[in-house]
Amino acid sequence: MYMWRERSKEEKHEDVVNTGLLPLDVVEGFKIRPGFFRMYGACVASNGVSFTINSHGATRCTLLLFKPQAPKPYARIPFPDSYRIGDTYSMLVFDIKPDEFEYAFSFDGPYEPAKGLLFNEENVLLDPYSRAVTGQRKWGEKPEGGKDFEYRARVVKSSFDWGNIKQLEQPFEDLVIYETHVRGYTKDKSSGVSAPGTFAGLKDKIPYLKDLGINAVELMPIFEFDEMESARVVDGVQLYNYWGYNTVSFFAPNTSYAFNEEHNHEGDELKSLIKALKENGIEVILDVVFNHTAEGNEMGPCFSFKGIDNNVYYMLTPDAHYYNFSGCGNVMNCNHPVVRSFIIDCLRHWAIEYRVDGFRFDLASILGRDQNGAPMANPPILESLAFDPVLGKMKLIAEAWDAGGLYQVGSFPSWNRWAEWNGRYRDDMRSFLKGDDGMAGNAITRITGSRDLYSPESRGHKASVNFLTCHDGFTLYDLYSYNEKHNEKNGWNNTDGDNNGHSWNCGAEGETDDPNVNGLRRRLIKNAFAALLCSRGPAMFFAGDEFCNTQFGNNNAYCQDNIISWLDWSRLEEFKEIHDFVRHMIQFRKEHPILRKMTKPSSCQFPEISVHNGTPFNASTDYKTKLIGIMYAGRNEEDTEDDIVFYCMNAYWEPLVMQLPVLPNGKHWHVDTNTNAEYFDGEDFTAKTELLGVNTIRVPARTTIILVAE
């Protein structure tokens, strides 16, 4: 009979495998026995450490043990042949203490580059399952030991107390996602935090995030990457791989993002951040990069996958060169069974050990290609992730394109589990909001849920992640301050970055003292947020847009570890009106579920969504249409009263007249928002809106007016 009891706090923190096993062999002076074959990486046992790794093509594997920061290993322990089952090597080494060594592997086997085989016993190879990478602790410094790209792993003892924290499981369509870079968010002294540029610094900003109203943060890459990879100096300024879209280790957090030393407890500060966010009702989504690695192409280093199984982990051409659909030198062979298992293990690790709520997949279309680079109808990796039991409640978000020309917005294989960054929403809405001809019909379609791309009957209102800005491209302030990109400081003669950003400088390139230009820019920024937060589906915006952060026209700031990429928090006071307007619109969205999703039908028989372009129920558009009106109507689950919201946008440079539908049951239209007026919390904008009759308003040039039925 089994008697259940609650484990003590100490037992819950037990992070070792209690074995009672005895050594079977002695190799190079170390007592060993076969390890835990089903537990990849380094696993601490009560009397030693188990090391497990696999390679399809190797003929021999050796464990390398280093004293901390030592240039050469103090021990080389070959795995006996009997410690290999199939392609997996596993060995338990007795009487070694996790805090006294670093480890790596070497593999011997055929070296035949023409066949994609790169085995070389001299290579020091990082464990793909390493929970911490040494030599990366201090931002902007070469790895410890002075060698480029020689990475080693450290054993991590996991004893973090999560308490009763669980996944928040907020409905996808309710999310307002805040994309940010951990370092850049608080690195500038204007942030006022005690630990700038770190997980702890971001944690200090949680009260700000909660007050703003967002309910999800999407963290740009926090897997271990080497910011010194491709580091260079341009015009006296040190440039780095700042964004981090070049993964070194997929199971390890970036140690330079931790404020405190976490020797053998790497990840605790990140876990503390995640726990605090979730305690405040904010979900955590990680931006993950499985489309390529930091090993690059034929000219790149060999520090992990290349030396373990180059022709398994990477897509190779018939002559064994690297496909480059990522634009970064190589492409991971994601649908190979070995790589597929690795990716699933990785995501499970972050779901279990770090309690994250979802993942955004960079250049996700690569995950849908076969080993020859051809798109697949039903990619095994995407299907596996969609139905994995551990990941069953995870938000899965695809950047549904890649650098090889594959564009799958609206057609990404989903199994009704995957959402997509809606690039069509970004492009169409940017064009309409700045007044381009012929875009009104597209704008209406995008605002009302992109039904041409995502059928609400089969996909609900969660498939389209709507956004106007993200890390890649102009900030929202720059979108209305620059006609052209200004990436000269990146050192590529302004040839990098997007050339078609649909931006408009409002009459002056960059900063200006012209009050008319600055007033127009502020109005357009408010128009953008009003449209985004009145659109069906989850909304996302880039951190700092809510207070007009600028990158000075740089739309590809991937290498700028300075004020170009850091948030300038002094602008929060300068653009307080914009910040308060964004906070208001987020709250308005929360108060009106009909904006986000279908609710119960309205009692007045108004359609769920109807279009009123100038006159009631006029859904027609032509090339010159600039005035659109969208009415949402329904009832919330707990309400008997109808919830009716009217969104009106004039993208023309002159005022236009909007006739509103006649409301039933003695209700009248109340103006909630008018972007042509300054926003002050709690102000009634009805008096600032020109009424031409009971149900007719004049909409000023380039202005959004939002009304509700009362």
Image: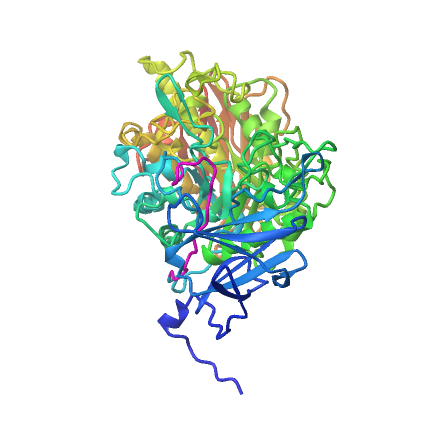
The verdict on residue 146 being magenta is: yes
Residue lying at 45% horizontally and 54% vertically, measured from the top left? 354
Q: Quadrant of residue 84?
A: bottom right
Q: Residue furthest bottom?
A: 1
Picture mark count: 0
Bounds of the magenta segment? 143-160
Taking 442 as reference, is 162 above or below it? below
Q: Is residue 398 left or right of residue 95?
A: right
Residue lying at 30% horizontally and 28% vertically, measured from the top left? 571
Mainly helix, strand or loop, the magenta region?
Answer: loop
Quarter of the figure that contains the N terminus = bottom right
Image coordinates for residue 262, horizontal then vertical, percent: 34, 52
Q: Is residue 222 left or right of residue 437?
A: left
Q: Is residue 473 left or right of residue 516?
A: right
Quarter of the figure that contains the C terminus = top left
Asked if residue 617 can be seen in this view, the reply is no
Residue nearest the observer in this picture, 450 or 695: 450
Residue lying at 47% horizontally and 68% vertically, measured from the top left? 17
| Color scheme of the displayed model | rainbow
Image coordinates for residue 577, horizontal then vertical, percent: 32, 31
Asked if residue 625 can be seen in this view, the reply is yes
Image coordinates for residue 37, horizontal then vertical, percent: 59, 63
The verdict on residue 202 being magenta is: no
Image coordinates for residue 192, horizontal then vertical, percent: 25, 38
Residue nearest the observer in this picture, 28 or 518: 28
Q: Residue furthest front?
A: 29
Residue lying at 51% horizontally and 36% vertically, measured from the top left? 246
Taking 483 as reference, is 538 above or below it? below
